[in-house]
Image: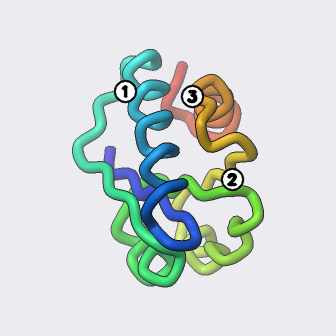
Amino acid sequence: MNILVSCANGSGTSLMMMKSVKKAFERLGIKITKIEHTNIAEGTSTAKSYDIVFTPKNFLNMFDDAKAKGITVIGVKNVMSDKEIEQHVREETDLVK
């Protein structure tokens, strides 16, 4: 599973969200092959190289092109909540049976 975490500047928020994503995926028993965090500009241009993109909800529409190409894009309200991320993964993907 290749995951991209993207926020405005690609430093603080995306780093915190990346840690939350790791916790959620570990709890779900889903192996992460590669996970990276980046800013929105780079994220929107490289999103098609990933299986899932996580971004704050207010940037969700910036990934419409990736969604159109079949990439799962998940908007997160509380980037520090691994429980919210786990819930989104359960509801918006077929990774959890």
Number of marks drawn:
3
- Which mark, residue 30? 1
Q: What type is the residue that disc 1 sits on?
A: Ile
Q: How many residues crowd mark 1 within 10 Å: few (<14), some (14–19), many (20+)?
A: few
- Residue at point 50%, 83% (across, down): 41
Q: Is residue 1 left or right of residue 59?
A: left
> Could you give the CA–CA distance between mark 1 and mark 3, rounded to whole angstroms?
14 Å
- Residue at point 58%, 71% (across, down): 8
Q: How many residues crowd mark 3 within 10 Å: few (<14), some (14–19), many (20+)?
A: many
User: Foreground mark, 1 or 3?
Assistant: 3
> Could you give the CA–CA distance between mark 1 and mark 2, rounded to whole angstroms?
19 Å
Q: Position of residue 68 (x, y in %)?
A: 62, 74
Q: Is residue 34 left or right of residue 40?
A: left
Q: What type is the residue that disc 3 sits on?
A: Asp
Residue contact at pointers 3 and 2, CB within 8 angstroms: no
- Which mark, residue 82? 3
Q: Nearer the viewer, residue 39 or 64?
A: 39
Residue furthest out toward the front: 12
- Residue at point 70%, 65% (across, down): 60
Q: Secondary structure at mark 1?
A: loop
Q: Earlier in the sequence, mark 1 or mark 3?
A: 1
Q: Position of residue 52 (x, y in %)?
A: 47, 53
Q: Quadrant of the C terminus?
A: top right
